[in-house]
Image (tube, rainbow, N blue to C red):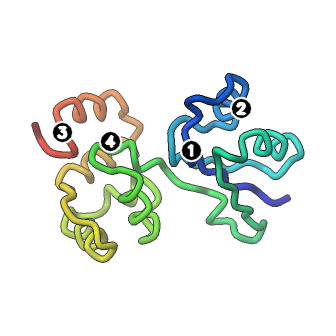
Amino acid sequence: MSRLKITYRKSAIGYSHDQKATIRSLGLRRLNSVVIHDDTPTIRGMIFKVRHLVSVEEIPDNDAPAANPGDDLQRIEGIGPKIARALNAAGITTFAQLAALEPAQINAILRDSKIRLAFTETWPEQARLAAEGKWDELKALQAQLTAGRQA
């Protein structure tokens, strides 16, 4: 069975309550978030209802790495959608992979993607806490940060 990669592209503000509920039921919480579902008639029906708010990509069965989207790197303070896409394109899809990098290596990846003005010094530490599941410690650290910098 193939799988569907669903990306939340347009805000549901101003649309009916049932369309907002369908977006939430698909597992989409914020713009540019991505979920992967099995290609079933139920999921297809939900997508049809909110087709103007999402984009859909079919993932073939033999593409196993794409079926695992990895961690949500945007949970790291200072990483937004554009930086997350650049890191994913470079093969960094999990918190553990990000934690293993030095800030200079991260900067090189971002420079190759033509992204400037990112402060990466705290990202490996944040990623290490996230990879270890220490969410309370991560939240405490992020409370001290502004856009990834020590406040």
Q: Looking at the picture, which amino acid does disc 1 mark?
A: Lys
Mark 1 sits on what residue? 10
Q: Residues within 10 Å of mark 4 (few under 14, many from 20)?
A: many
Q: Nearer the viewer, mark 4 or mark 2?
A: 2
Asked whether, in this view, residue 80 is left or right of residue 118, the answer is right
Q: Determine the CA span between mark 3 and mark 2.
A: 33 Å
- Label 3 or label 1, whichever comes before in sequence order: 1
Tell me the residue at 11%/41% (across/down). 150
**Secondary structure under the numbered disc 3 in the rendered image:** strand
Asked whether, in this view, residue 46 is left or right of residue 111, the answer is right
Tell me the residue at 73%/55% (across/down). 4
Residue 74, position as x, y percentages in the image: 39, 47
Q: Looking at the picture, which amino acid does disc 3 mark?
A: Thr
**Secondary structure under the numbered disc 2 in the rendered image:** helix
Mark 3 sits on what residue? 146
On residue 129, which mark appears? 4
Q: Determine the CA span between mark 4 and mark 2.
A: 33 Å
Asked whether, in this view, residue 11 is left or right of residue 64, the answer is left
Residue 1, position as x, y percentages in the image: 85, 58
**Secondary structure under the numbered disc 4 in the rendered image:** helix
Q: Nearer the viewer, residue 68 or 85?
A: 85
Q: Nearer the viewer, mark 4 or mark 3?
A: 3
On residue 22, which mark appears? 2
- Label 3 or label 2, whichever comes before in sequence order: 2
Residue 30, position as x, y percentages in the image: 51, 38
